[in-house]
């Protein structure tokens, strides 16, 4: 599309109050960042890049906002989808072992899948979900089944 916004999600950035500590948490999950230490970290994930950036700097760059306090629910969840139903439970255990707080245990959902929620050390909320009939491309990007 020449005029407009392409239909893709390239980068998700979380404003972090302590980039080093939050980076260490995501590295304990097994995610790798090649970024040098500092107020930014990037994690290439399945066709998109997940980044952490100093919250105050990000808020200022985005139009002079004030960063919400750590732990405040921002009305947004992020999601990691897994290949098999049983992996939801295992992923929540792995997140807790890395320092996350499990917010909602894994359960079967009325939409046919299974999911649960955790918060990272700064309160960013993640869903771990299995979607029946979903698959992933060679990079690990979700191929939406519907």
Image: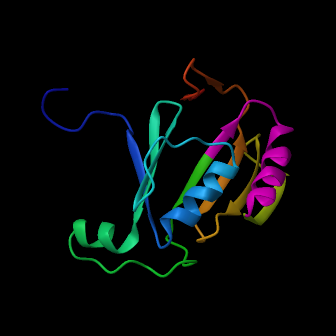
Which quadrant of the figure has residue 137?
Answer: top right
Q: Looking at the rendering, in which quadrant would you find the N terminus?
A: top left
- Residue 70 vs 117, above or below: the answer is below
Q: Nearer the viewer, residue 30 or 105?
A: 30
Q: Nearer the viewer, residue 38 or 142?
A: 38
Colouring: rainbow
Q: Is residue 108 visible?
A: no
Magenta stretch encompasses residue 89:
yes
**Residue 33 image offset from top left, x and y in percent:** 51, 43
Specify the segment rendered in magenta: 80-99
Residue at position x 75%, y 55% in the image: 95
As drawn, the residue found furthest toward the front would be 37
- Left or right position of 12 against 59: right
Q: Is residue 99 left or right of residue 137?
A: right
Residue in the foreground of this view, choosing between 81 and 69: 69
- Quick check: 122 above or below 39? below
Query: Magenta includes 95?
Result: yes
Quarter of image, res 83: top right
Left or right: where 73 falls relative to 53: right
The vertical placement of 85 against 61, above or below, is above
Residue 104 in percent (x, y) is at 78, 64
Query: Is residue 25 in view?
Result: yes
Whole-percent x and y of residue 52? 45, 57
Extreme residue toward the top, this view: 138
Q: Position of residue 28 (x, y in %)?
A: 69, 51
Q: Most prominent secondary structure in the magenta stretch?
A: helix
**What residue is drawn where x is 58% and y is 65%?**
21
Image quarter hosting the C terminus: top right
């Amino acid at each position: 599309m020449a005029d407009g916004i392409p239909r893709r999600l390239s980068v998700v950035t979380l404003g972090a109050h302590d980039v080093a500590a939050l980076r260490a948490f995501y590295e304990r999950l097994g995610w790798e960042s090649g970024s040098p230490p500092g107020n930014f970290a990037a994690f290439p994930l399945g066709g998109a890049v997940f980044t952490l950036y100093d919250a105050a700097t990000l808020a200022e760059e985005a139009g002079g906002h004030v960063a919400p306090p750590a732990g405040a629910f921002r009305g947004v969840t992020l999601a990691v989808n897994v290949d098999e139903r049983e992996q939801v439970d295992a992923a929540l255990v792995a997140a807790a072992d890395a320092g996350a707080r499990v917010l909602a245990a894994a359960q079967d959902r009325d939409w046919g899948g299974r999911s649960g929620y955790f918060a990272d050390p700064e309160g960013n909320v993640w869903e771990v979900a299995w979607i029946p009939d979903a698959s992933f491309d060679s990079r690990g990007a979700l191929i939406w089944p519907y």
